[in-house]
Amino acid sequence: MKKNQTLLKIVLLAISIYHIALGIFAFISENAAVYLAESFFGMTLIATPQLSYFAKLLGIYAFIFGVIMLYVMRDPDKYKEIIKVTIILYALRVINRIVFAGLVQKAFQVSDFSMILEIFLLIFFGGALWALMPRKR
């Protein structure tokens, strides 16, 4: 059981670092947001004042989500309900990406490969959380 908890903490740490970094970069620079969208998600974005505002807004949410995951990592048994909600979030993100795949590809010129890769990563992290989540209190 201790091995699962160590693996769970590693997964939570990876989720945390990713979201904190993404949040910081999206908040501090619209150029960084454009670069990250292209590098990580294969999205082509055009830097506009509207994009800058929404990138900063989403950056705040990403940053706070990363902080929450860091907090959960400290005691996954105590915060298993937050892990469950996070699994639901990942599942909804997968569904959203599949249902709106055509829209995402049209709006942001995302390749099939990038779409599949992101779906795979969402399934991987959500699945890892589900598989490693504490079962008993």
Image (spheres, rainbow, N blue to C red):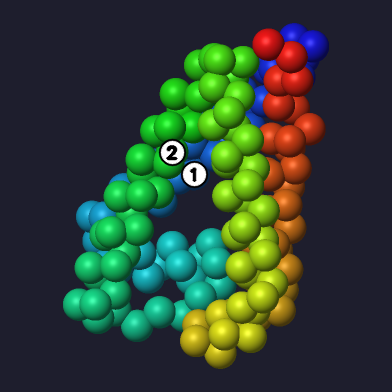
Identify the residue at horizontal 47%, vertical 80% (top origin): 44
Q: x%, y% of residue 64? A: 36, 40
Q: Nearer the viewer, residue 67 or 134?
A: 134
Judge left or right: residue 101 versus residue 18: right
Q: x%, y% of residue 38? A: 48, 71
Quarter residue 52 falls in: bottom left
- Distance from disc 2 to disc 1, alpha carbons, whole Å, reads 7 Å
Q: Nearer the viewer, residue 30 or 127?
A: 127
Q: x%, y% of residue 88? A: 63, 47
Q: Quadrant of the C terminus?
A: top right
Identify the residue at horizontal 69%, vertical 35% (top origin): 129
Disc 2 + disc 1, Cβ < 8 Å: yes
Local secondary structure at mark 1:
helix
Judge left or right: residue 9 versus residue 49: right
Residue hosting label 2:
66
Task: Tell us which disc is closer to us: 2 or 1.
Answer: 2
Q: Residue furthest left?
A: 49
Q: Residue furthest bottom?
A: 106
Q: Amino acid at mark 2?
A: Gly
Q: Amino acid at mark 1?
A: Tyr
Identify the residue at horizontal 75%, vertical 10% (top origin): 2
Judge whether 9 appears above or below 61 on screen. Answer: above
Q: Residues within 10 Å of mark 1 (few under 14, many from 20)?
A: some
Q: x%, y% of residue 134? A: 71, 20
Residue 78 at least partly seen: yes
Quarter residue 102 falls in: bottom right
Q: Residues within 10 Å of mark 2 (few under 14, many from 20)?
A: many
Residue 18 is tagged as: 1
Q: Nearer the viewer, residue 7 or 65?
A: 65
Residue 59 is tagged as: none
Identify the residue at horizontal 54%, vertical 62% (top origin): 40
Judge whether 72 appears above or below 97 on screen. Answer: above
